[in-house]
Amino acid sequence: MKLETRKYKTIDVLKMPLKAAPVAVTLLMLWGIMQAIIPTALLAVATAWFVDTAIAIFADKAVTSAIYAPLALLLVVVALNSLITNAGPQIITPRIKFALERKFIPAFIDVRASLSYKHIESAKSWELVERVSKDPIKSFQDGLYAYRVMIRSILSVIAILGLIITQIWWAVPVIAVFSVPLFWVAIRAGQKNYEAKVDTRKYVRRHEYYTEVLTNREAVEERTLFGYGEKISDDFIGQYEKARKVEFWVQLKQYAMAKSASICMSLIAILIALTLINPVITGDLTPGLFMGIIAAVFGMVNMLGWSLQDATEDLAQSKEYMGDLTAFVELSRTEGAKDLPDDEPIAFKELEFRNVSFKYPTAEENILNGLSLKIESGKHYAFVGANGAGKTTITKLLTGLYDEYDGEILINGKELRTYDTSALKALFSVVYQDFARYQVSLAENIALGDTARDVGDDSINKIASLVELDETITDLPNGINTPLGKVMEGGVDISGGQWQKVAIARSLISRAPIKILDEPTAALDPIAESRIYQEFEGLMKGKTSIFISHRLGSTKLADEILVIENGEIVENGSHDKLMKQDGLYAQMFEAQRKWYNE
C-alpha cells in the first residue's frame, strides 16, 4: 500500500483501513450494528415482556410457569449484549491493528525516506512529519471507533425513537433539536483539541528530549558526575506544564459546554418519564413497556452525552489529522532517494563548480556566493575555513541533498542534476561529523558502506586492518560478528575513536571514487585528529579525497587547499604556497600551530 498524493478526507479513516483489512473492518462495523439492535429494541421488548408477565403472575392473571419464556429471552439478550460489547471488539480490533501496522507503517516510512532534504532541516516541516507519523495507527483506530459508535448510536436512537413515537410523539422533535448542539459541541471540541496538540507539540518535543537526557544510558556518566538531574528535571516539568495547561484549559472549556448540553438531554429524559406515567395509570401503556422505554431513553441520553459525543470529537480530530496527512504527502520528494547506489560507479575524471550560489530555503542570505573550484581525479584536496563558511554546504550539493542552486556543478563535464540519484550515491562516500553508530555487528557496520554487493568477511577484515581495528576485533568476544552498543544481546561498547575508525572503514569499503571526510574528528583533540587524517591519506594513495575542516592539522597532506570565506574561494594552492602568500590561511595556521607542537 502507498500513500497517494491527494486530498484526504474524514471518510478516509474508514476507507483506508477497509482497504487494508476488508474482512475485519466489515465485521467490526456489523458488530456495531448488532450493538445497536440488541441493547435497544430487543432489550426493551424483552424487559417489557418479563415485567408484564411478572405483574400478571402476582395479580393471579397468569400461571407461574409463564415467566420462564420471558426470563429466558431476557437472559439471552443480556448475555448477547455483554458478548458483543466486550468479546467482539477485543477479538477483531487487534487483527485490524496488525493489518494497519503491516501496510501503513511501511507506507509512512516510504514517504519519509523520499522527502527532500530541505524538509528534514526545516523545523516547521519536520514538526508536521513527526505529528503525522508519530502514531498513525492510533489515529486510524480512533477514526474506526468513531464510525462504529456513530453507526451504533444512530441506529439505537432510531430504534428508541420508534418506541417513543408510538406513545409520546412530541418527544422526538425535542430530542432531535437538543441533539444538534451536542454534535456541534463535539465537533468543535475535536477541532480545538487537535489544535491544542499542534500548539503544544513544541513543548512536548522539549520535555520528551529532557526525558531522554534524564533516562538514557548515553548521558548516565555526566548525569552522575555533574549532578544536573534536578536542574533538567525542573526544565522537564516546566515544558510539561506548559503543554498540560494549554490542553487542560481547552479540554475543560469543551467539557463544560458538552456536559451542559448533556444535562439538557437528561432533563428531557426525565420529562418523558413523567409524561408516560399517566398512560401507565390509565392502562394505555403497560408497566413493562414503560420500564423498557425509560431504560432505553436514559441509555440514549448517556449515548448522546458520552459515547456519541466522544465519537464525534474523534471524527473532528480525524478531519484535522487528514488535513495534516494531505500536507505530509504533498511535501516535495527526491526522485530515486531510496535507490541503491549503482553497481559500478562512473569513471570519475573531473568535478567543477562554476559560479555556484546557494541559500538554504529558510535563509535570507546566500551561504555560497559565486563559488568556483575544480577537483581532479587522483588528487587530495582540503576545504578549510571558519565554521559557517560553507564547507559542509558544498558536500550537500555534491551529494545531491540540495539541487536548487544557481550556476553549474559539472561532473565529467555533465551537469550534476542530470545524473540519477543512484549514480551520485555510487560516486561519493562521506564520513560526516555526526557519523552514525549502528548498533549491529561490526561486520554489518562496515558492510553498510557497499550495499550494492555482498561484502564478504575477507574484504571486511582487510579494510578493518587498514584502519587499525585488528586489536579491537581481537578484544571483541565474537570478533567482527560482535554486536556494537548495548541494544543487541551480547553487544559491546567501543570507544569514540574506535567508532570513528569503523565509520572510516565503512567509507573505504565503498567503491565510490571520491572519499570525503567532513569533520568526523571534530570531537577529538588536534593531535589525534591530525593522526587520523594522516592514516586516511595513506589509505587514499592514487585516489580522490576531500578533507573538510576548520582545523589545519591535515592540510599539509593535501595537493591543493581551498580556503573558503563567506561562501567564496579566497585562496587556493599547496600548503607551502599559501604560507608564502601570508594571507588568511597563513594567519589561521599560525594561530593553530601550537596545537600541533610545531
Image: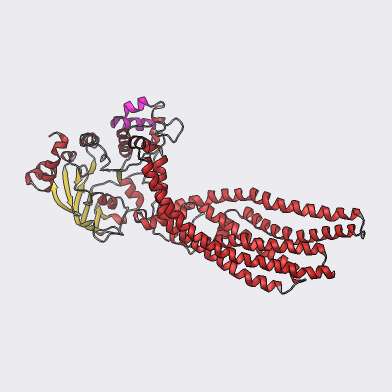
* 186 relative to 586 in the view: left or right: right
Where on the picture, by quarter, is residue 518? top left
x and y percent of residue 509 in the render?
33, 37
Q: 578 or 354: which is nearer to us?
A: 578
Report the quarter where the C terminus lies: top left
At x 28% / y 53%, what residue is drawn?
397
x and y percent of residue 592 in the render?
15, 40
- Residue 458 sits inside the magenta stretch: yes
At x 65% / y 67%, what residue is drawn?
265
Does 103 appear above or below 491?
below
x and y percent of residue 104 in the render?
51, 52
Question: Which range is magenta?
Answer: 454-475
Does 481 appear above or below 573?
above
Does 216 appear above or below 473?
below
**Residue 358 visible in image:** yes
- Residue 275 sits inside the magenta stretch: no
* 205 relative to 579 in the view: left or right: right
Q: 369 or 51: which is nearer to us?
A: 51
Q: Main secondary structure of the magenta part?
A: helix
Does 442 appear above or below 164?
above
x and y percent of residue 290 in the render?
78, 64
**Residue 4 visible in image:** no
Where on the picture, by quarter, is residue 503? top left
Count of picture labels: 0
| Rendered image coloring scheme | secondary structure
* 284 relative to 489 in the view: left or right: right
Q: 412 or 593: which is nearer to us?
A: 593
* 290 relative to 266 in the view: left or right: right
At x 22% / y 54%, what residue is drawn?
353
